[in-house]
Image (cartoon, coloured by chain):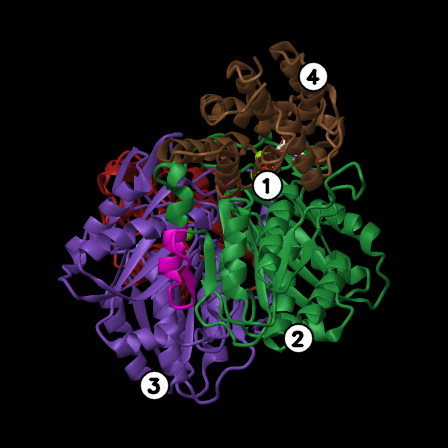
Chain colours: A purple, B green, C red, D brown
Amino acid sequence: MKKIINNPADVWEEMLRGLSFTHSDLVERLGETGVIYRKYEGKGKVGLVSGGGSGHEPSHAGFVGKGMLSAAVCGEVFTSPTPDQVFEAIKKADQGAGVLLIIKNYTGDVMNFEMAMEMAEMEDIKVEKVIVNDDIAVEDSTYTAGRRGVAGTVLVHKILGAAAEAGFSLEEIKALGEKVIDNIKTVGVAISPATVPAVGKPGFELADDEMEYGIGIHGEPGYRREKIKSSKEIAEELVSRLKEELNWKKGDRYGVFVNGLGGTPLMELYIFMNDVQEILSKEGLVFDYKKVASYMTSIEMAGLSLTLIKLEDEKWVEYLNQPVETAAWV
Amino acid sequence: MKKIINNPADVWEEMLRGLSFTHSDLVERLGETGVIYRKYEGKGKVGLVSGGGSGHEPSHAGFVGKGMLSAAVCGEVFTSPTPDQVFEAIKKADQGAGVLLIIKNYTGDVMNFEMAMEMAEMEDIKVEKVIVNDDIAVEDSTYTAGRRGVAGTVLVHKILGAAAEAGFSLEEIKALGEKVIDNIKTVGVAISPATVPAVGKPGFELADDEMEYGIGIHGEPGYRREKIKSSKEIAEELVSRLKEELNWKKGDRYGVFVNGLGGTPLMELYIFMNDVQEILSKEGLVFDYKKVASYMTSIEMAGLSLTLIKLEDEKWVEYLNQPVETAAWV
Amino acid sequence: MMLTVENTNAWLLSFADKLIENKEYLTDLDTAIGDGDHGNNMARGAKMIKDKLNSQDFSSVQDIFKAVAMALLSSVGGAAGPLYGSAFMGMAKQVATDDNSVDAVIKAGLESVQKRGKAVPGEKTMVDVWVPAVKALEEGKLSKDAIWEAVKSTKDMKATKGRASYLGDRSIGHIDPGATSSGYFFETLLDSNILD
Amino acid sequence: MMLTVENTNAWLLSFADKLIENKEYLTDLDTAIGDGDHGNNMARGAKMIKDKLNSQDFSSVQDIFKAVAMALLSSVGGAAGPLYGSAFMGMAKQVATDDNSVDAVIKAGLESVQKRGKAVPGEKTMVDVWVPAVKALEEGKLSKDAIWEAVKSTKDMKATKGRASYLGDRSIGHIDPGATSSGYFFETLLDSNILD
Ligand SMILES: Nc1ncnc2c1ncn2[C@@H]1O[C@H](COP(=O)(O)OP(=O)(O)O)[C@@H](O)[C@H]1O
Ligand SMILES: Nc1ncnc2c1ncn2[C@@H]1O[C@H](COP(=O)(O)OP(=O)(O)O)[C@@H](O)[C@H]1O
Ligand SMILES: [Mg+2]
Ligand SMILES: [Mg+2]
Ligand SMILES: [Mg+2]
Ligand SMILES: [Mg+2]
């Protein structure tokens, strides 16, 4: 394990300190917890709380601020945060109009956030949730924990963040969230693994010439491992998977988001975006929104994911483009 | 070499296509060149042109836009762009008030940009230059090509970009640039190398437990290679080097910028920032500006650099904080 | 078969020690079919259990269970945190009722686990240890062999709950980490002589 | 010792071929003490030279030199681009004067390289090949041995100009890439029989 860290056991604490020091103009850390909340929350608006294990930086704390999240709960690396901390975040986020939890679909996240909801309800805070499950690499069946929440989550933060800022009610935001989530699909590929500092060795292994399609952002297994392919071939594979899900037709309006997994340089992400754009242009899709960024990472994993959002409503484009004040969203 | 690319010879072209597709709301690519320019340049303001070899993304094209650069010239990977392309960028950037070139101090960059200046002068365009040489890893003597320009360059873009937007004259911006550059010092460390796609093998080699202090952003050698140290120890080394240069005293106002080299996740950058902040707080410095981002990368190199800027003028803080419309600056 | 402040305390302290001792083994199991954090998660929880139990005198078994539940809930995270947390919550409630025998209490823990996690036997989770263990308890024949056989039985199962379910058939052939940490729960219960 | 459209054309085409053939070697040399792009830079320039020379008929040596200068300036980049570009610019100017002997023309090229790059002999650059080569030309005794000896002489030098200067003493022991590509420049000049 080659990392610029101190004691692996201190990664979470030191990262939170560095993060809250760096972004002290925008956010604050709640005591010794993993809760990062907006310094200036809009009065009377619905609060948005998200979070999950750490190791996906800038998700989720990098998206806390005006126009996006009210608070993020940062668990230990790759470990869902605990209910008491989620509950603290809910209390911070609540401005009287209620709080929506944006949960990535992992057993642990769902259970911890749900327990926090129960705690909040006992204190008469209105709380609702949406569960993001954009990762089509996983079969959506009763034989799995369901599809995972991955990079598409950030688009949910962005769209719902703009809606919350615009004064939507809790019910409206939840309904919007569910509709948006239905229209977001993601699939990824990894060419090298990540190492959880406290574990000290990579979460999986890939030979020098291997890659894996459909990998999860905690290194969960994907759907196929093969010899590394060209960017164009990878783009064709991922697009064809997404097409099976989204069944687009010519002229459909889409947003495209190429997300880096942490160790992949922008150079590769742009090259991949170019291939995706060529393929999708041939399909006759119209691009109303485009994004290349490493927003939902897996520590230093090399690889990327491709997210498509079907822009059912042109308002969504407006929400995606709305300026925000956060540490990470550009 | 494990990368998500197609033919290595096409990296430059495909990256530029992906980049200009992705950011078509902000910038445009000039024909088949490596020139990326602002779609909406402010009339009558001084133009700012920077650039250099590619492989440092988001530098420099990611900083083109309102409040920062007028145009960036992207050379082949790690290769200065050619004078004719720099000249094209100058012509695009010129709005009648002249153009300032922000050049990183490398023999090739300086010569190519200077030849472009000569071309522009022949066409009666007012052009001036500043040369950024913030990398203190190199001895500043007649026995070297002088200190290299590295991550501090982005702060120069930001400050001068705000000044240009505020209507400064060419002479004023050049003078400000020189003053700012005098107050910016950077030093870096690498824990793993980058591979230029067309070369196919790493630019240098580091053992599994080795790191190198003072590495350049093209893999140029640093000043010391040793067994990998903790983040805290690395921070102590880099800060002590910077202190020799900056000779600060208690109460001095500083900006701190921790820059990732491409393959290093935010997790490590924040941990490192926490260590830097602890050391510098003990030194009694006041932090008026803080930034953690991978802005001046070296393809997928793992490592980071630490930039300190002595904030001689409180205006500079204002300029650093001024909102901009670019692909990469947050 | 009586839970007392003393024996409960001793039991849970040795459960915590077992978790800390076997941190790396649990990590390895979770690396194979999960995300590699179960060892650290449970060790963090175990440290918290020890801190709480060692720093305070408890006047009832219920208070111990409550304290342990809160310790786990507020420190473990992941899937295991809410599941073990819920188990101890359920046990805390049950132990305050008339039916406070060990088997009734543990059974209440299992019910809470299942209510929270919705898993049934055969899905390759901790439930595959709890269900046969509760049954053996009720029949008065809980043994180490029985416990570890239940743990090992998860090896041939295909996971359909939790993170390991993403592996589908590839989850077969690996022992479940949560089942293993539950093995320590029951093993230390046996060792604590509570059942004698 | 006369430059004609024909022999100049042939010379520079074979210079370009040599650069393309030795792309990897130049890359390796530049990886050792630079940033590894000299091979690709010069090969890109060489392709451009070939494209220009093959697609057009030139009526004067000056036009050839100008075309090659522009080809290199607009395609090579790095340090080598402006240096070789300036060299050919200087040569183009000189060849149109009365003193258009090969040695005077090449000497003008060297002067432009030094004006642009400010390097003097001993700094481990292409200048360390050009200076002795020009001298040998003037004395009528340029030979392959002399050229490659000059190239090799850069091995023991410490770089004080260009990217290799960052290495300080560690640059010693490696042949300079730009000196090597300049070696091809002079070698193909010899082979072209221009000097006969
Ligand atoms: N729905 C569930 N019901 C019961 N146990 C479960 C369930 N989901 C997961 N588990 C248990 O949790 C264990 C994983 O715990 P842990 O690694 O701490 O959480 P995570 O999977 O979030 O990383 C699994 O080995 C399994 O025994
Ligand atoms: N100031 C200079 N004068 C003459 N030649 C130089 C100078 N600086 C560099 N060179 C030559 O340029 C060569 C490197 O060229 P190249 O690799 O294409 O450029 P870069 O160093 O920008 O990557 C060196 O080997 C050296 O011979
Ligand atoms: Mg986990
Ligand atoms: Mg170069
Ligand atoms: Mg786990
Ligand atoms: Mg070079």
Dot 2 falls on a residue whose secondary structure is loop
Crowd class of label 2 (few under 14; some 14 to 19; many from 20; radius 10 Å): some
Measured Cα–Cα span from mark 2 to mark 4? 54 Å
Nearer to me, D5 or C159: D5
Q: Residue under circle 3? A: A168
Inspect the magenta stretch and tell me whether residue B19 lies in it. Answer: yes
Q: Position of residue B325 (x, y in %)?
A: 49, 71
Task: Say what amino acid the circle numbered 1 marks.
Answer: Pro
Q: Position of residue D117 (x, y in %)?
A: 69, 39
| Residue type pointed to by label 3 | Phe
Which region of the structure is painted magenta? B16-32
The 10 Å Cα crowd at callout 4, few under 14, some 14 to 19, many 20 or more, is some
The percent position of residue B10, horizontal first and vertical second, equals: 38, 41
Q: Which residue is mark 2?
A: B168
Question: Which residue was labeled with disc 4?
Answer: D136
Q: In the rendered structure, are the residues bearing label 3 and label 2 in contact, judged by CB atoms less than 8 Å apart? A: no
Say if residue C70 shows up in the picture: no
Residue B49 visible in the picture? yes
Q: CA distance from mark 3 to mark 2?
A: 43 Å
Residue at (74% x, 61% y) in the render:
B178
Instruction: Please tell me whether mark 4 or mark 1 is closer to you in this view.
Output: 4
- Identify the residue at horizontal 62%, vertical 59% (top origin): B121
Estimate the x, y position of residue B309 in percent, counting from the top left.
Answer: 73, 61
Q: Nearer the viewer, residue B330 or A146?
A: B330
